[in-house]
Amino acid sequence: MEPIFTDEYFMKKALVEAENAFEKGEIPVGAIIVVENRVIARSHNLTEMLNDVTAHAEMQAITAAANFIGGKYLKGCTLYVTLEPCQMCAGALYWSQISKIVFGARDEQRGFMTLGTQLHPKTEVVAGVMAEQCAQLMKDFFKKRR
């Protein structure tokens, strides 16, 4: 029997968050944070609604997870995010000491990998989970805006 709690299982939950952002006119990035197969934080971009350039999905998820845990370090936690984190979010993820980051689509222009931003040395990264679905949502969003 295949395990139910796969990276794809949780990325689908992050995609639901991205779709919520899409419906609100926000850039459709969704994120969840999981510990021991339990979702402890879910978020999506809120930069337009909050008029705040730092209100990325990852930043919102980090704050929610830290509040849930009652501490600033996210050791043992996994972030699932539909788009490769930018360098601002990667910096916050570095300081949170998150154990694992799983992302969908690459951000070839602003992603932390492209820009060479360092993560915590113990953070594991898995790229490309459901990348096509994540990228398509972004394409649909920007096509709609043009």
Image: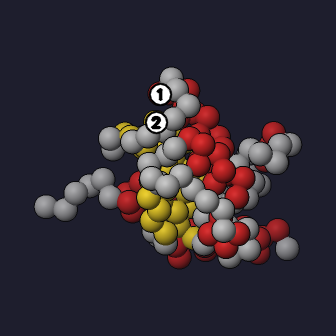
The location of residue 87, given as percent across then percent down, is: 70, 58
The location of residue 26, given as percent across then percent down, is: 75, 54
Neighbor class of circle 1 (other Cα within 10 Å; few <14, some 14-19, many 20+) is few
At horizontal 74% and vertical 44% (from top left) the residue drawn is: 55
Quadrant where the image shows the N terminus? bottom left
The colour scheme of the drawn protein is: secondary structure
Q: Earlier in the sequence, mark 1 or mark 2?
A: 2
Mark 1 near mark 2, Cβ–Cβ under 8 Å?
yes
- What's under tag 1, amino acid-wise? Ile
Residue topped by disc 2: 40
Secondary structure of residue under mark 2: strand
The location of residue 100, given as percent across then percent down, is: 44, 53
- In space, the residues marked 1 and 2 are separated at their CA atoms by 8 Å
At horizontal 49% and vertical 69% (from top left) the residue drawn is: 127
In terms of depth relative to the viewer, which is nearer, 19 or 125?
A: 125
Place residue 112 in its image quadrant. bottom right
At horizontal 57% and vertical 56% (from top left) the residue drawn is: 119
Lateral position of residue 104 relative to residue 87, left or right: left
**Comparing labels 1 and 2, the label whose residue is closer to the camera:** 1
Residue 133: which disc?
none
Lateral position of residue 53 relative to residue 41, left or right: right
The location of residue 59, given as percent across then percent down, is: 66, 44
Place residue 72 in its image quadrant. top right
Secondary structure of residue under mark 1: helix
Residue topped by disc 1: 69
Residue 14 can be seen, yes or no: no
